[in-house]
Amino acid sequence: MESLKARDDTKSEIQTFFKGLNIFLTGGTGAVGQVLLEKLLRSCPISNVFLLVREKKNKSPETRIDELFNMPLFDRLKVVQPNFIRKITLVIGDCEKPDLGLSEEDKALLVARVDVVIHCAATVNFIEPLRRTTFINVRSTRDLLLLARRMNGLKVFVYVSSAFSNCNRNYIDEIIYENHIQGDTLIEMAENMTDSAMDSITNKLLKNWPNTYTLSKCIAENIVQQYGSGMPICITRPGIVVSTYDDPVLGWVNNFVGVNGLTLGAGLGAIRVVLANNIKLAVVPSDRVANAIISSAWHTGVVGTTNSIPVFNYVCVNMAPRVRLSYLLDTIINTVIKKKLFSKNQIWYPGIIYTSSKPIYNVLFFLLHYLPAILADIFLRLTNNKISAVRIYKKVYKLQNVLSPFTLIEYKFNDQNVMDLISRQTDCDKSLFNMNLADLNWEAYCESCIRGCFKYILLESEMPKLDIWKRVFLLHYGFIAIMAVIIFYTFILVLNFIF
């Protein structure tokens, strides 16, 4: 600890720690892992990254790596580190398989050369069957810890969890909470029971957890405590991860999962009603999450662990107030309208109604989503278009139901370990690996979020589309005028009938 106090603020202790080290990264092709990988390669003088990649959708690991580094996220890296690809060693594996699907040769290579393990891989599908979730999120963690124990040069193991791993409780401290089921027991059940048998007992096993993802993350943390005892290890728990703030680009996002989906749907006018309370969201930009993971690795690697494994709840609590869901979505909508940032895929003029009542939500969802979708499908079928608006809104309905535990319930966190970690960074590291959420300009960030959705997900120009804006504007106010006329004449008819 003393070495951290006697510091030179003009130098980067994080870069000094990572100099010449070999990293084994899982989940490097995922939403958080991509940003983390780019940051490690661009800002840390590492020697090598052993990158675990699996075959996916009939694409080989080699093809997926080529596609990964062709993303705009890595454009800045290519300028400052043109030879970065030499630091990448592809390791073929699959976290759904025993021992992460690693060959004996690759295991030996990793044991001999790896200094830092960052386990970022996970299935984040909230409705994933428990059996598959157990393999990917729990068993892979155990098997990787057993492999890491054999690494003589291991300096730190970072397990990337979730701030909602313990969402069965309202207050979440920076500690590992015991679970009602042992990790090894759940793994044994998943390995020996059929899919149907596991599905039949899932609700019983979930207890107060809203989904298999959060339950599996809690059990995996217990696995870390059980198998990581005595190792230089820490747990980083990010909140709801959204697009980058500014590093290496503004608003980078490549998926519309969770809040990203709400953001895109709000901007397109596709989502008109949201099942939510006006709660404070634990959202965090993905680039700040990457910096938090790197910083926690540095701190744990230098200081080590004591009697308990350090846990970092990376959410806004003490360092900055959390943003409310209504503010986030309304700011995005106002930005789209004010700056006329309409997409060529624009569904309607943006606007959202919030309700925490499920019956009211269902009625509004039918009136504002399903009913227009049915009319749209009639028109689409008449024009021989195979797109189904109803099918799309069934997915939107499912998305909102899945998100409802996090949009209806406000959780409280302790982030003191994160605050202490920031205070221990040198001034240089606070700039290079900024993880302070207090300096976020939420209004500007909301704009970059929706621009990022249009640019990186919909692959559209950032230029405002005035012709689309005029069409949406006219349709919106034309619809209001028609509805006003219908309501007025209905009122007149009712009065005439009564009197």
Image (cartoon, grey):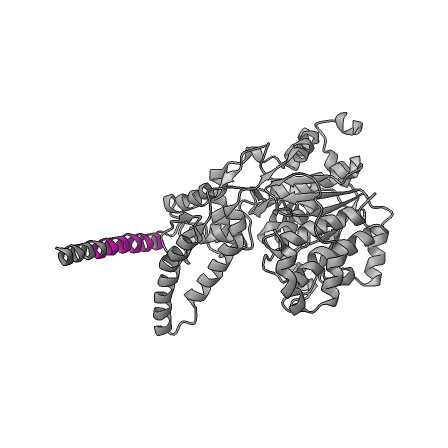
* 483 falls in the magenta region: yes
Res. 89 in view: no
Quadrant in the picture for residue 374: bottom left
Q: Position of residue 97 (x, y in %)?
A: 74, 63
Question: Vertical placement of 359 versus 173: above or below?
Answer: below
Camera-nearest residue between 188 and 63:
188
Question: Vertical placement of 282 versus 7: above or below?
Answer: below
Q: Position of residue 389 (x, y in %)?
A: 42, 65
Q: Position of residue 481 (x, y in %)?
A: 24, 53
In the image: residue 467, left or right of residue 387: left
Residue at left offset 15%, top offset 54%: 495
Residue at left offset 66%, top offset 57%: 205
Camera-nearest residue between 293 and 196:
196
User: Which stretch appears magenta?
Assistant: 468-486
Quarter of the image with the C terminus is bottom left
Quadrant in the picture for residue 15: top right
Q: Main secondary structure of the magenta part?
A: helix
Q: Residue furthest top?
A: 6
